[in-house]
Amino acid sequence: MKKVFIIVIAIILMSFNFHNNEESYSLTITEKDLRNSKGVVQFALYNKEGSIPDEKYKKYYKIDSVAINDKSATITFNGLPKGRYAINILHDENKNGKVDKKFILPKEGIGFSNYESIGMSNRPKFSKASFEVSYNIKKVITIIYMSS
């Protein structure tokens, strides 16, 4: 009886492992048009409605910074479950991890997936910036410098 009980428990535990083998994907993001090679590029990935804009970087799903090489930077986020994601990048020239401003405009370059420009009538939001990840995907983001 004890052996049967152990076998039943083992089968139950194995069935949980099979359900956790969810497919995952990679997302490679590239920025090629930085104004210089100072600092780093911070890549923030979002997966929830209402998460962007996120000026203080508190609502992200994943975030990482990479070195700049010849005015460009690339990162790959691996192990992403199928879903909707949006990207925010920051050319963090002074490596302080935040959006520095001159008056009210960002001093450093920023960018969002699916945005070529940003303005009062074209403010970033998740619904416009998001895209479906259901296979391994590559994205190029436009960097926007609003002040010099």
Image (cartoon, helix red, strand yellow):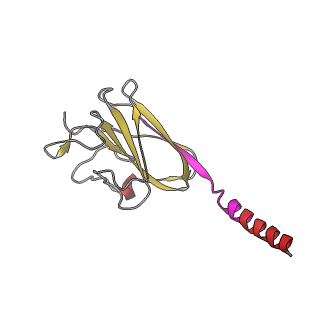
The residue sitting at 36% across, 39% down in the picture is: 142
Q: Nearer the viewer, residue 135 or 37?
A: 37
Residue lying at 80% horizontally and 69% vertically, measured from the top left: 6
Residue 22 screen position, x and y as percent: 63, 57
Q: State the quadrant of the C terminus.
A: top left
- Magenta residues span 15-31
Residue 11 at x, y percent in the picture: 78, 66
The N terminus lies in quadrant:
bottom right
Q: Kindly give the residue lying farthest to the top in the view shown.
A: 70
**Of residues 115 and 38, the one drawn nearer to the viewer in this rendering:** 38
Quarter-wise, where is residue 19 in the image? bottom right
Q: Quadrant of residue 100?
A: top left
Q: Position of residue 74 (x, y in %)?
A: 45, 34
> Is residue 134 toward the left or the right of residue 70 in the image?
right
Residue 113: percent from the left, percent from the top?
39, 47
Residue 73 lies, with reference to residue 86, above or below; the image says above
Q: Is residue 144 above or below residue 121?
A: above
